[in-house]
Amino acid sequence: MSEDLKPFRYEPIALSNESTVVAEFQPDAPSVREATYQSEAALEKAFIQQLQLQAYDYLTITSEVELLVNLRRQMERLNKITFSDAEWERFFTTSIAGANDGIREKTARIQEDHIQVLKRDDGTTKNVYLIDKASIHNNALQVINQYETPVGENAGARATRFDVTVLVNGLPMVHVELKRRGVDIREAFNQINRYQRDSFWAGSGLFEYAQLFVISNGTLTKYYSNTVRDGHLNEQSARRGKGGSKSKTSNSFSFTNWWADAKNQPITELTGFTKTFFAKHSLLNVLTKYCVFDVDRKLLVMRPYQIVAAERILQRIATATNHKQLGTVAAGGYIWHTTGSGKTLTSFKAAQLVRGLPNIDKVLFVVDRKDLDYQTMREYERFEKGAANSNTSTAVLQRQLEDPNARIIITTIQKLSRFVVKNKKHPVYEAHVVVIFDECHRSQFGDMHAEITRMFQRYHLFGFTGTPIFAENSGTTGGPLRRTTAQAFGDKLHTYTIVDAINDKNVLPFRIDYINTIKTQVTIRDKKVSAIDTERALLAPERITQIVDYIREHFDQKTKRASRYRHDGKRLAGFNSLFACASIDAAKRYYAKFAEQKKTIPEAQWLKVGLIYSFAVNEEASDGILGEEEFETEGLDASSRDFLDAAIQDYNALFGTSFDTSADKFQNYYKDLSQRLKKRELDLVIVVNMFLTGFDATTLNTLWADKNLKAHGLIQAYSRTNRILNSVKTYGNIVSFRNLEQETNDALALFGNKDAKGIVLLKPYAEYYKEYEKRVGDLVAGFPLGKSIVGEAAQKAFIKLFGSILRLKNILTAFDDFSGHEILSEREFQDYQSLYLNLYAEFRSTSEAEKESINDDVVFEIELIKQVEINVDYILLMVEQYLKKKGTGDDKEIRAAIERAINSSPSLRNKKDLIESFVDSVTTKTKVDAQWQSFVATKKIEELERIISEENLNAEATRTFIDNAFRDGSIAATGTAITKILPPVSRFSKNNGHATKKQTVLDKLAAFFERYFGMT
């Protein structure tokens, strides 16, 4: 009798031995680590030795001549050719170091156009690879250190030495800046400023090929892309206007990345970082696969968890195809990456890599709402122009599915479902497709999901979500076999929770006010709003009035309107907010109350309020899933639609637009509203469910919530506020008019872990205030006003202490309790700030050699000072008061107050003599501001003419140059314009001093520009 043999199932032991991110990193045991002091030179030496152990070739190249010889040799090796001298000269000047090429052009060459065409001496052509992306191990990795930039014509006035550089095929592609242990890692980042004039562009500009930067103090190590460096440099040289990068202020230290293993454990120590990040295959994969050069010409380098997710998807496609599992749940899986961690970039890169697989016919990226369809397409278009295809109708979708050139298609689940219903048979059902669902919560678990997966035969199904559906939050509706994310999509391929993201500082923590639950004195207004359970009572006019009053009274405080910063080329004051309401009825009432209150308050205090809602079957779902609002206004009752039309008319009057609730115009209203919210042109937008999921605006910092939220919906709504922007925005503000404390704790436990609350939520006010009280006490005792701070050690201690007070005060100002308890008077704080700025100016003006010793462990919080900066308008108001009091005795006090205000302002200190001279000359005969305009115009002409005379400049060309600078918002440090204004010199005479002269003139004109820009 024979027994039926069951077939064996083989499971792979290892999918790849070359995953870019190591599965789990085990650091050296404490007993193995060095215990002695390590200098910066010793750290650099140990780093290079580790690279040599990893098969990097160490070269003693310290000059450009040697660099160019090596580059030619490496290009010949990689491409198996020998250049003639003429061919090399031609190739080098056209395909490597063009005269007009800058960082962006060279980055584009590496990222998008790495195969250049060589015209040979015999007239034939040959493809020459700068880097081999298909077979990465054909690329040669070399390391050099202490390279010195050239000096003289076409170079800097002073030589600069770089720490360590990794050459890929002879091109400098990774630059490493090291500081000794114990020095703040931000100082390595700030060293960029010292390369501003005499660095990467010098000579042939080969160092502008650096794609990545690594900074380390031995203990902590981070990496970031070249356009973060370039943007930071631009913002330093031209803090206003068009000079800086325009993409979400992503040029600060906040946008540097930690490296980690696949379990999200950061690998911060330089030795471990070198073993993993600088492993040959890892570094080359990051350079060739895991960077995105977007249409704004910004290089986005992916974070380790994003890389792991993309590679896990590729691995799952390969194994499922080999195991013939297509068309089953086992062929896919889901990625749990918390909201705000960059899921769209991860999904785009995954789709882009999948598109390149030879056996994949289509990649479908499926979203569950039209607004997300629009947003995702905009993001994909930003990553790569023309990479994806969106569709306005099912008919367009059908044409794309039938077009072999449409490889990546973005669509809604509704359109895809309608296509399936209309086409019971279609060739695409037999195609090998990868379907990626964005935000794969249970809206996609229903009948449409079942219909799609039934019709397609050879698919892989992948889902991205920040808030998966588990058994605990699955509810009881829908098919029992598809209630959880795992049931619908398969295995969890990778996890990156909100706790991971906040620990890595990739998103901000939350600060929550439960207005109705805090019991305190009756006199405190913001604690008066009562919590009443019934919806009828919740919509009572008295309560609506109380909440609107609260929002208006606390709006500036919560959104930090006293804080100033630069964003998207503009100078902005504070942030903006969303107001989430429980129903359309509630949204209407709140909007009407805001509009009504305009009648009783000055126009200067009006908030720019927007309103948007549309028909949703369930406005408030019991399981925490936010109801889906489509762009369908037809389903609204007549009253709600008329009200929305009226609100849109208010919007039209405000912004000069012409929207209404008709189908197309309403979609365009949504798009316009979302853009104005992102640009901070609106103060507050009242919503029901729209914008609470999938909407990103870095300027948004506050959510006002009069709505029951829990689980998935709660985390999604809260996460609208916690995108990183700059050092002024340190947390997302949640102001809840309902008691959501238990729901918040439950959601954090579900989507984080049992310790999540302590990481994700800011500490209570009392803890911050206790620390603030102690620091201010130390300040007053250790550095009393009127007493000089003598010695470098004391100065460093003061800078560190006052910096910590600035950071604490930045957090405390959002707490209602802080008002009136600042300890230091306004005058005392100004005086301490003046001392702080004096030291900042002194430290910046010391020589380069001294900077290395003095500035090593000093980091100034200038951005936090700028947020509460005194401006010229404020000074002119004080001048008016001075004139009124002149001769009464009080004028001396006002004059002293003006001087204190100037000394405490970073932007007014270089105008001090101007302002004081103006105060001496001003009269009561005409308006102060008119006198100021005339005074500034005269002084501006006088100072420019003096510079022209002193430096013997071309007068007309200089005036045009300066006019263009004021028009564009920055001094043009490169190009031919600056050359035209310089006095003529023979470029062929020895030591003609052209570079030095150019730098001197640039310095003077930059100081002139900083002094007068924005003054009138």
Image (spheres, rainbow, N blue to C red):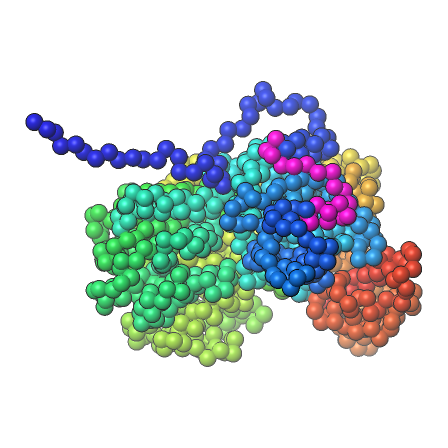
Residue at point 40%, 72% (across, down): 667
Q: Is residue 449 left or right of residue 839?
A: left
Q: Residue furthest top?
A: 31
Q: Is residue 334 left or right of residue 348?
A: left
Residue 470 place in picture, x, y as percent: 31, 44
Residue 736 place in picture, x, y as percent: 43, 53
Residue 681 place in picture, x, y as percent: 54, 67
Nearer to the camera, 661 or 913: 661
Any part of residue 217 in sight: no
Residue 853 place in picture, x, y as percent: 78, 38
Residue at point 54%, 65% (across, down): 679
Q: Is residue 457 left or right of residue 202?
A: left
Residue at point 44%, 52% (across, down): 353
Q: Residue furthest front?
A: 122
Nearer to the camera, 741 or 837: 837
Specify the quadrant of the image occupied by residue 882: bottom right
Specify the quadrant of the image occupied by residue 933: bottom right
Would you say residue 758 sits in the magenta stretch?
Answer: no
Nearer to the camera, 640 or 390: 390
In this view, 578 is above or below 496? below
In the image, the segment drawn in magenta is 53-72
Residue at point 82%, 41% (across, down): 850
Q: Quadrant of the C terminus?
A: bottom right
Any part of residue 223 in sight: yes
Q: Quadrant of the N terminus?
A: top left
